[in-house]
Amino acid sequence: MLKKETEMKILIVVREPWYDEIVRELRKKNKVDYIFKSRDIFKIENGNYHISKLFGLRRGYSIVAYILTTFLLLTRKYDVCMTDYRSVYMPTLFPIISSFIHQFKTIFVYDLRTIPVDYVREQAETIEKQFCKEVHFANRYYQGITVITPEMLNYIQNKCTEIHKQVGIWESGVDEEMFKPLPKNLELKQKIGFSVHDFVCFYHGSLSNARGVIELVESFRIIRHREQAIKLLILGKGECSEKLEKIIRDASLEDTVKIHDWVACNEVPQFISTADLCVIPLPDIFWWRVSSPLKLMEYIACGKNILLTDIIAHTNAVGTNNKYFWVHETTADSFAERIIECYNCYQENPDIYFKRGMDERQRHLDNITWGHRSDCLQEYLSRLVDSDATLP
């Protein structure tokens, strides 16, 4: 029987770009092969299998990843094969075979970091039906299922099917060596177009219609007339980028709201350093209730003051007894009111204001690192492998 600290051989097959950090942590205790969709050319290095498009075809990744997954499962004795929700069929018949033939010892684990989001209403029925079909397959043939939050488990049980597998939970984490308190990068702040004395609000991530970003930008129509020192920096891109740019032009907010395109992950902390208040404007819809927002962990680790919408994904992460700022409605008026209150708090005593964020960082950091999240996943996978080892 395997013990919890015994090294496991793990194959991870994913299409979504959220697994690099957990792979890095799992490799500290295990042998991990990692197949993932990459923008680079096809290459293999140190157990990483970078799979890109094949001859420019979107299905190129699926074809190559399918062949490679099959080859590795046939030739290497893995203890665990974990896939994300978009790769559930990559192992093809292996999960089915293992559910009937116990001599095939690989444990298959289906991991859910997200449900389908940002689709238009007309596509809802088709997309949700396909998602539930994948969950049904994993629930029938995989030995384990992991989810990002308890709310995710509740959602799939209410929406799709009752889960009768052992379920593990591991939330989003943060690289505390990359995301940490930094001196304000005043040179970058000025390069973006702000004064060194401006109070900067910050958001980074995808820009889509249902993330509260539109309402956040519209709030600056109100804020600008009441306090011109408050600015907004958005780092990211998405389907509503043009709409946001139009709002900015029509309201003459060019000097107040700046939108910067994506940057490399290791550059993000420098942009966060320019912020006096980080804002997560996600509305209270089921897309975000089930989530564990990565940006929240990053803002916490950077020691920032944060304005959060009052949704369960946020209260689960930081609790209700904290020093963060909260907004109860995702409307322009509500954002404007709360941001101005945050600014007034800063004006009263900047030292006490910045200490709030640092105090919360100290309280939460140990529980949100990728190392801690990896321990949760490691314990779950070991428990599955141990349970399988006891079968006749």
Image (cartoon, grey):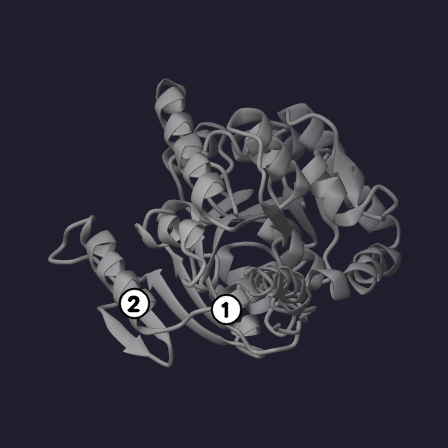
Left or right: 298 in relation to 322: left
State if disc 1 and disc 2 touch (CB < 8 Å).
no
Please identify the residue farthest to the left as the structure is shown: 55
* x, y percent for residue 4: 66, 72
Callout 1, which amino acid? Val
Task: Classify 208 as above or below 263.
Answer: above
Task: Give whichever of discs 2 and 1 has the lower sequence position.
Answer: 1
* x, y percent for residue 129: 39, 26
| Quadrant of res 104 | bottom left
Q: Look at discs 2 and 1 and give the one toward the viewer.
A: 2
Callout 2, which amino acid? Leu
- Relative depth, front residue between 52 and 189: 52
Q: In this figure, what is the number of numbered marks? A: 2
* x, y percent for residue 139: 49, 40
- Relative depth, front residue between 217 and 36: 36
For residue 23, which numbered disc appears in the image?
A: 1
**Callout 2 environment at 10 Å: few (<14), some (14 to 19), or many (20+)?**
few
Left or right: 357 in relation to 145: right
For residue 254, which numbered disc appears in the image?
A: none
* Residue at 57% across, 36% down: 163
* x, y percent for residue 197: 68, 57
Left or right: 96 in relation to 230: left
* Residue at 27% across, 61% down: 70
For residue 74, which numbered disc appears in the image?
A: 2
Local secondary structure at mark 2 = helix
Query: Is residue 99 among what the camera can see?
Result: yes
**Callout 1 environment at 10 Å: few (<14), some (14 to 19), or many (20+)?**
many
* Residue at 48% across, 57% down: 18
- Relative depth, front residue between 355 and 192: 355
Q: The C terminus lies in which quarter of the figure? A: bottom right
